Every structure is written in structure tokens, then in C-alpha cells.
Image (tube, grey):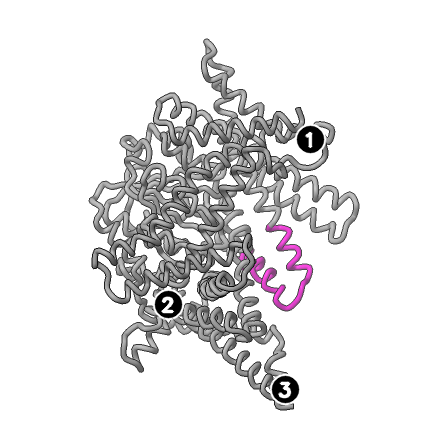
Amino acid sequence: MRRQVPLALCFVFGVVMVLIEFSPHPYSKSLYNEVINWSLIIGPFALVLGVATLVQTHWIRIRRRAEYWQYSFVVLIGMIVMVAIGIPFGPSHKAFKWLFMNIQVPMDATMFSLLAFFIASASYRAFRARTLEATLLLVAALIVMIGNAPIGDFIWNKIMPFDNLPSTVRQWILENPNLSSRRGVILGVSLGVISQSIRIILGIERSYLGGGD
Amino acid sequence: MEKLIGVWIAAFLTLCIYSFLYRDNPFYRFAEHLFVGISVGYGIVLSIHQGLIPFAWTPFWQAITQWPPGWGLTKLIPIAIGLLFFARLIPSYAWLIRYPIAILMGIGSGLAIPNVMQADIFRQVHGTLTPFSQIHAGTLSGPEIFGAILMLIGVISTLTYFFFSVEHRGVVGGVSKVGILFLMIGFGSAFGNTVMGRVSLLIQRVEFLLQDWLHFI
Amino acid sequence: MLKKIMRIDRRIIFILVALAVIIPTLLKVSFPITVSEPTRKLYDYIEDLPSGSTVLIAFDYGPSSMAELQPMGMAFLRHCFQKKIQVIGMTLVTDGATLGYEIMQEAAKTTDAIDGEDYVYLGFRPGTIQVMLGMGTTINSIFESDYKEKPLAEIPMMAGIKNYDQIDLVLDLASSSTTEAWIAYINTRYNQKIAAGVTGVIISQMYPYLQTEQLIGLMPGLLGAAEYETLIDTPAKATKRMSVQSFVHLLVFGLVILGNVAFFIQKRENENV
């Protein structure tokens, strides 16, 4: 019950979805739609569970007076306020949108904008042309950076022939050597995804069941 | 008025986050935790309003209020399976969560195999080899022919680098070294584009502070 | 001196970056934008669509990418509304729900597009791949109502739109792997034309799909947004921001060169000793 039935369910649903892909029969299409609907119904419960787990984590931090436990109150209050407004009035309500646009959006954007500073600092301190590989990486990065910036073409056009060379070279790098390496990665990753999917369906890969019995 | 209050709150929180650049401090920690709480709350509301209600609650209500009972009752089965997720919160019944996870994994894996094979393997290999039929037909220019040959060399050498079942020595070692060079160019391009991506966020925040908050521009 | 240069406090670099953004923003500098082929392909495809065609835009991004993708969405929406192309908006990520709604409203105001007749915003549904595939059967099976909970049956624009057969293009504004999912599942299964506008981090991994024409066009990051604004002859936020961007790129370029020059000089000194 605890392991065999889930593995059997995984096998059945997996095989059915693969076989349906190759069957033009109308019954196959109905079955396909029904399975998709099932996964659409089951999926949102996982999202709500993730939230319940987070609440549990912060509640434990408060009870145990863990480091910075006071900030866990901030997490819970923020969450409760959004839920208290959003659930009865809906996500298109003015107050809910106001909270999202004036609190979540600026903070989310600002958090990630910090990376701009760290990228510049890390580039200066760590980006060294020590080996041929590092040099290639560095040169490609510099060409793409200058090619992306409009000032690159602007300055080049003023002082050199061959208009827009920085952006042209950038485009060539993206459409040729970059494309080749990315394609190699896509092929490799896809083969990995397919083999992993087959292993999951056949029950060879069972880590998603968790530990214990 | 609410717009003005919103701008000031957004500006205050923006500066709280930027204070981290000097060092970690209570303002940053407050803003960070508030962000987590607000975004989780937002996620809950969206998941319930735009997920659970249309996909679970509405069909459930229609199924149990429908008279005479019809095929709508079949919707109760996936709803019941979805509810098994909450068994995770009761330690002695936590194993029940394996049922919905196994079903979702099976569906996801089954969908992935034919579609990923078609899109990411067949089409990509086709794209690599198509230029050679065009070379044969004589429709490509000199630089395009060079690009096609370079692409083939790049794809094969990159794949060779990732093929760890054979030791990277001799010819295989040489080809995989070429693959590394192509990968480095790819990573360099990615870095160059990432700089653009992250800096654009910074520019947007500075624009907000200078224009919407301080009205300097 | 060399050691000081190589060990400069990172907060000084932070200040330089901040100044490289603040000063050009205050001075309102502007540079012309060179349009690249991938963006032009997308623009030409929309230009060739007749009035009354339908485009679906997936606003699959959150606030952490809106600086690049919001201007892209705005420029593209303006183009569609000017050409009287109907637009369906939706999203596969929770954060995109409100952002997508806001940008569609803002774009509609600039062109007098009418909600329900020229555009409709469906909102968010969880499930990514299942949502995409479900819409291939009928859009109604996934979105019974729009974002403001008006039933689709009551929306005039949706009367003739059942699934992807009536949609001429899907544009994915993405900051994660949703574009690959649209290509793998919808382009493959339904032969649906897909285009993408992506954030800087994932630009380079889109090019293999462009070459195979699994993507018919691509707007690469903020630069792509600025290029599209140039093509529709409406320079706006993206064009201004790219001009400011130039100075930061020059700064990073200079810092990398300086760091390497100092490194090589020190290396030579150590070898001589």
C-alpha cells in the first residue's frame, strides 16, 4: 500500500500518457483530456500545502525563540494581511493590488537589482584571463556586453568603418558558437530528462516517494 | 493620497533592501521577512482564487448539487486524491501523500517523453543537419557554410564533453577540449546578457526613486 | 599601488555602479538603437497579420524581471492594438497575474482598446504544462471567466475563439523555463507559432530554437524591448533605460580590463622576483 500502489499508479498514468500521444482514436482524446483535468485538479492542493509548511516553520521558530525569531512575526503578519484582504475580495480588489504593487513588487525588484552591484564587484575581483578557457569566456562576455549597449555602436560608427560592428559581432557570437554549445546542452539535458522520465515510470527512480518504509 | 503613501512605502522598503550593500542590518531583515510574508500571502490568494476554486471547489459543488447525479461525480475522485496532500501534516498518515505525488509524476513523465524527444532532440538534430542539405543544393553563401560547419563541430564537441562513459583521452579528449571552448563562449555570452538583465532592474529602481519619489526627473 | 587596486573595497565599486546609473538617468542621455534580426522577425510577423487576427500573450514573469519584460509587453501590445489585432492575456506564474492585468490596462488606455472587444485578460491558472495542454482542447475548460470573473461566454471577443486553432501567435514573456515548455508541448503538438520575449539571463539559450524556427521571433531582454519600441516608432522606457545601461556596461568593461591588467602586471613582477 505504502510503496507498491504509488509505484503502480505512476506506471499506469505514465504509460497511458505516452501511448495516448500516438493514438488518434477519439476515445484516446477523451481519456487524455480527462487525465489533464485530473492533474489540474490535484495540482493546486500542493501549492496550498507548501504554504501550510511555511507557516508551520515560522511558528516553530517563534515558539523556540530561534535566532531572529521576532522577524517571523513580520512574515506571519504580512501573510495574514494579504490573505485577509485577498480571499474575501479577490485578487483584482483595489487594496490587494495596492499591497502587491507597493510592497511586494518594489521589494522583489530591489532584491534582484542588488545582483547588479555584486556582478560588477565579482567581475572586477574574480574575472581573470588565467587560462585559454577563461580568456574565451571573458572575451565573449565583453563583446556581448559592449554589443548590447547602444553606446558601443554609437562610438564605433563615429570613429571606424563597418557600421554597427559591435552589435553585429555580438549577434554572430550568439547565433554561432553560443548556439552550438547551447544546442549540445539542450540535447544532453533532453536525453537526461527522457531517461529520468522512463526510470520514474518504470519505478527504478523512487526518490519522489521520500524515505522511511 | 493612497498613491502618495504607496510611493513613500515603496521607497522606504527599497532603501531598506539597498542598506544591505553597506552591511546586514535590522532594516534589511525586516524588509526581507515582510517580503516573504506578503509574497506567500499573495501566492495563497492566487492559488485559492484562481486554482482551487475553479478547478476543485466549483466542480465539487456542481457534482454534489447536480440532480440527477451524472458524470460530474467523477470529479470527486481527483479532489479526494488532492486532499491527500494534507496528510503530510499528520505524521502517522504522511505516507498518503505519495499517491497524489506518484500520479502527478507519472503524468508529467508520460507527457515529457514524446514531446521533449520531438522538440529538443529530433528538431534540434534536424536543425543542425538542415544547412548541409542547403549546402548540397547550393543555396548558402560562404559565411553561412562556415557557420553551418562551425555549428556541427560545436554541437558534436559539446556533446562529447558531456559523454562521461568513455575516458577523455586521445581523440575523444581532444574533441571534448574543443567542446569546452565552445561552452566557454556560451557561458561568456550568457554572462554578458545577465549583466544587462540585472542592471536593467537597478535602472528601474533608480528611476522610481528619482522620478516617482523625489521628482528629480 | 597594484595591491591596493586589486583589493579595492567592494563598496567603492557599488558607489561607482550607483553613479553610473544615477548620473545618466538625471542627464537623460539617449543613443540610437540598432535593431537585431530576431526582434525584426517578430515585428514583421505581426505586421503581416491582418486586422482581426488573435494573439495570446503569456505574462510568465514576476517583479524580478518586470524591468525588462514590462516595456516589451507594452511595446508589443501597442503594436497589436494599433493593427486592430485581438489580444488574449494570461499567465502561468502567480506573480504575473497582477502585472499582466496592469500592463494590459495601461496599453489599452494609450490606444483606446476596449476590454472584451479588443483584448481580454484571463489571469492565472496553476499547472503550467497542463494549463497549456488544456487550452489546446478548449480555452473555456481552463478559464471559464476572465480575471474580473466575467464568464467568457459573455465576452464578445471570445465568441469565435475556442482553442489554439483560432490563435495566430503565442508570445511568451518569460523569466524562466516556460518558453521551452510552450515550444515542447504547444508548438510540437498543435504546430502553434510561438515567439518569446525573455529576460537577459536566458537569452542565449533561445537561439537554438530560433534557428529551427520553433520560435518565429525573439525579443532579447531590455535591448529587445528597446528594439521593438524603435520599430513601432515609439521610443519609451526601454530606449531610455538602454541608454543608461550603456554606462554601466562600460564601467563593468573597464573594471574587468583594469583588474586583468593589474593581475598580469603583478604576475610578471612575481615571476621576475
Residue C77 appears anywhere in the view: no
- Residue at (46, 10) in percent of width and height: B67
Quadrant of residue A172 within the rendered picture: bottom left
Q: In the structure shown, which secondary structural element does the residue marked by tag 2 occupy?
A: helix
Do the residues indicated by labels 3 and 2 lie within the same chain of the protein?
no
Instruction: Report the front residue among A114 and C208.
Output: C208
Q: In the structure shown, which secondary structural element does the residue marked by tag 3 occupy?
A: helix
Do the residues indicated by labels 1 and 2 lie within the same chain of the protein?
no
Chain where mark 2 sits: A
Q: Mark 3 sits on what residue?
A: C270
Q: Is residue C144 above or below residue C214?
A: above
Q: Is residue A69 above or below residue C166?
A: below
Q: Mark 2 sits on what residue?
A: A170
Instruction: Report the front residue among C19 and C171.
Output: C171
The residue range painted magenta reads: B8-35
Q: In the image, is A72 to the left or to the right of C170?
A: right
Q: Which amino acid type corresponds to the residue marked 1 in the rendered image? A: Ala
Helix, strand or loop for the magenta stretch, by majority? helix
